[in-house]
Structure formats: C-alpha cells, structure tokens
Image: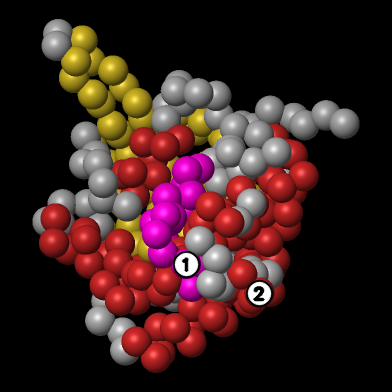
Amino acid sequence: MLLATQGLRKRYQRGDVSVDALVDVSLEVPEGSFTTLTGPSGSGKTTLLMLVSGLLTPSGGRILWRGQPLEGQGDAAWAAFRRRQLGFVMQAFSLVPYLTALENVALPLAVDGVDAVERRERARLLLDRVGLAGRSEHLPRELSAGQQQRVAIARALAGKPALVLADEPTGNLDPALARDVLALLAALNREDGLTLLMVTHSPEAAAAGTQRIHLEAGRVVPAPATTG
C-alpha cells in the first residue's frame, strides 16, 4: 500500500470551542490508483491532504507511507518527503507569471539542483506529455485556463513523484476544459501508472477515478449513489 491512514484525527481549538475536522479517518491509496476524495464543503477533504503531506499536524492516528509511519517526524524530514515523493496540483494554477511554461515546469528541478540542460529537456518532455509541446515559450497570460492547468500538472510531475495530490484541479475551469483536464489525469494514471489522490466536490470529476472515498462531517461514509 502506498499511502494509508489509521484512525486519523484533526481537532482545531478556537478559543473555548473545539472543532473536529477529521474523526477516525482510515483509508488506503493503492499504488497506481486514481483515488478521488469527495464530500461537501467543510467535510475535511483539504485538511486530509494537508495532513498526509505534513502541512498540518494530526491530533491523533497514524499516517503510513509504504507501511512506515510518517507522523511525528520533524519539519525538515517532512519537507524532504514532499520534495522527493509528492507532486501538487491546486485549483489556483500558481504559475510564476514572468516565467515561460518551460521555465515553470523546470523550476522544481532547479530548486533540486538538476543540471540546466537536463531540466530543460525533462520539462520539454513533460509539456509534450500534457499536449503543450508548441506552447513551451509562452507566458501564463498567453495560455488559456486549461493550458495553464496542464502546465501545472507537468510541473507537478517534474520531480517524478510517487503520488500527486490534486485539490479541486478543475475548480477554476469551465465544463469543457474540466473534462479535458480530467481526461489527461486519467490517461496519466492509466498509461503512465501515476498514483493520484484528488479532492473534488464534483460527482462527475469523481467518476474519473478508480476508487472513491467520501467524507461527511470529517468521517468516511459510503459515497452517495450517482444518478443519470
């Protein structure tokens, strides 16, 4: 199992009031899966992503990576884990506006000290993989919203992560562009074996995955039946 949680809990203290964001969440993300995490606003979806990436500290429970515990390690260890094992795709594309598509994709490799020739070549290959071979020298403002999200996906893949965490990656896209991005993510999972954990509020987006986990009020519950 690539990623698992056991009885994971997160409680926020706001003055005299305690708020349980996650309550005894146990789940598994198999290697090679496209796992979608659904639930209404405030159900704990984003909190869960932040916990498994070490950006929040759990109040209890366990986080396991390939069977080994992750919780309890220090900030430096978490930072190294994120850099070496995880890729991130967010609702806001978060591209550097004054860098080209190629430079945006290559940026994480520069931070890791990869040779300039190698990082440009890897970035070119990734832009080709996401269908943007002809847009490598364009700035973000010269790209459509869907193209900007494709650049962000390529950037998430630059470090060859074992797991990509995607938080509402189609949230800023119109329905047609959202379908294109979901089709790309599904193809990366199916053809390249990429493991994905994607937060979404959309049943249509959730249907792109190979397994679905549903949260209600911070607890894992059976997903509602889809219609249509």
Report the residue at 33% width, 44% height from top.
50
What kind of residue is marked 1?
Thr
Report x, y in % for residue 130. Answer: 63, 69
Q: Left or right: 15 with respect to 156?
A: left
Report x, y in % for residue 1. Answer: 46, 64
Report x, y in % for residue 23. Answer: 36, 29
Q: Left or right: 120 with respect to 212?
A: left
The answer to whether the residues at label 2 and label 1 have Cβ atoms under 8 Å apart is no
Which type of secondary structure does the marked residue at label 1 adopt? loop
User: Residue 21 versus residue 201: which sits nearer the camera?
Assistant: 201
In this view, 147 is above or below 133: above
Q: Which residue is mark 1?
A: 100
Q: Quadrant of residue 17?
A: top left
Report x, y in % for residue 38. Answer: 57, 35
* Tag count: 2
Which type of secondary structure does the marked residue at label 2 adopt? helix
What kind of residue is marked 2?
Gly
- Disc number placed over residue 134 in the picture, else none: 2
Name the quarter where the C terminus is drawn. top right
In this view, 183 is above or below 204: below
Q: Quadrant of residue 114?
A: bottom left
Q: What is the chief secondary structure element of the magenta stretch?
A: loop
Which region is colored magenta?
87-102
